[in-house]
Image (cartoon, helix red, strand yellow):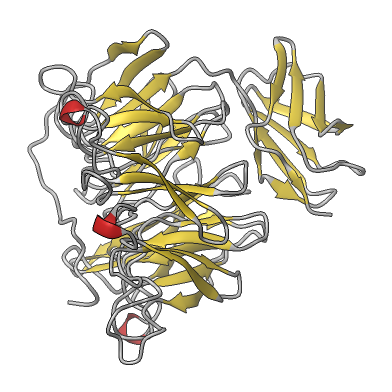
Amino acid sequence: MKGIANSLGKLKWGRRAGAVFVLCTTLSAQTFTTLRSFFGTDGAYPYAGLIQGADGNFYGTTYGGGSNLSGTAFKITPRGALTTLYNFCAQEFDDSCTDGSQPTAALAPAANGDVFGTTTYGGADGCCSEPAGTVFEIAPSGVFTTLHSFCSVGSCLDGIIPYAGLVQAANGDFYGTTEGGGVTGSNSGTIFKITPSGTLTTLYTFCSQNSPPMYCTDGEAPTGGLVQAASGEFYGTTKAGGANGWGTVFKISPSGTLSTLYSFCSQTGCADGEYPYGGLVRAASGNFYGTTANGGASDAGTIFKITPNGTLTTLHNFCSQAGCADGSDPQAALIQATDGNFYGTTFYGGDDAGGTVFKITPSGAFTTLHSFCAQPGCPDGQYTYARLVQATNGDFYGTTYQGGANNLGTVFSLSAGLAPFVETRPSSGDVGAAVRILGTDLTGATSVSFNGTAAVFEVVGATEITTTVPAGATSGTVQVVTPVGMLSSNVPFQVLQ
């Protein structure tokens, strides 16, 4: 077997048709809706979260199910109508899945309108029982292209098991991580860059600062993906390694120079947390926020803030409420919503031990918004590994790994009363750069401005406007005036020149 074994195995199940549409009001201001229950042929066990496309629909993957029992890529409307775009292991050859199988990561939107993603198994150098993995591209029409098969360089020098998703940087290339492989032979993982056409460059191999390796002081097994800061550097986490063996926070330059910013379990009793599986989110303040799956006051995980230079503050200890009503074992990254607060999920805990959706302010005030498995049979879903996404209508969308009508997972939405907004793709660019503005009910828009500077634009449809960064524009909020009011961008647009 090549590389290291993945903790997730090949899944099979009995196929049962059925779906539910459940409304559950958790608090006066929150409305939870189960949009879809998977039933096998349309996918099963959605491990990853969703992204919103330029068409206003959501795109995601399932770890299992589909016509080949190897996972799917799908599109789902805000009302729950699902279309399977691709069934993995469609290019099977000699018991291998050359196109990849069993995706665990969220898709990444690209500037060209396609989505890019990774699989943990399959590829030209792996099969259904041997982890390797791929990088792929899917057009909204479902046209599929395999861009890279991991473990294609001797001894898996290019890495193995790209557990996390990709991020498209300001230069147009994608950056990502692998959980294992790399040049040291220790299977500690890599950081890589891949061009949209598929040329991969390994930027860094973990456990490379030890000879011979005793402890991987620079970290081991990155599973949370990367986030790019305004400086151009990338920040991320490893789930293990570091000075104490319980994970790290790091930054890396686009050319591959890595600095370890923090090693977890640096405080007595691991009060600062252990195993930061989920990665980071960069806040509007410039600081980063994240979660650990274990450690903290109750060994049930934490939420933390860390500055760009590595000063860490623990904001919340999970299982701090009676019966772990606040949740436990968070596996996913946080998001910062348009109200400035952070939203996330836990895998366990809550009123019914099926996990939670929560909100936390930048200063640490915590609120549980929904407890999964709130009804017999868990029709609202159970256990979530996935990060939430805030759609341009203001609501949150996500997935559960199990539960639903067939116990094969769900897609859900949660309305918290937040207003609609617009999103720019990309969120930075030079004067003259092409920008797509995504939103809701954009038909009839009369004005687009970049921090007050008017731009020439074209309304493509109800969910998309195309424009360019106007001369004289400065960094700040993008605003769109529509017949129903003014919509502002969820994050400031950074004008590079």
Q: Is residue 407 left or right of residue 314?
A: left
Taking the spot 23% from the left edge, 26% from the top edge, the residue there is: 372
Whether residue 115 is visible: yes
Q: Residue 233 at x, y = what percent?
A: 61, 63
Kindly give the residue lying farthest to the bottom in the view shown.
212
Q: Is residue 182 above or below residue 435?
A: below
Quarter of the image with the N terminus in it:
bottom left
Whether residue 109 is visible: no
Kindly give the residue lying farthest to the right in the view shown.
472
Front residue (pair 435, 204)? 204
Q: Residue 393 at x, y = what percent?
A: 54, 21
Front residue (pair 269, 82)? 269
Taking the spot 31% from the left edge, 72% from the top edge, the residue there is: 180
Q: Is residue 223 left or right of residue 115?
A: left
Front residue (pair 12, 497)? 497
Taking the spot 20% from the left edge, 33% from the top edge, the residue there is: 349
Q: Is residue 463 above or below residue 336?
A: above
Quarter of the image with the C terminus in it:
bottom right
Q: Residue 230 at x, y = what percent?
A: 67, 54
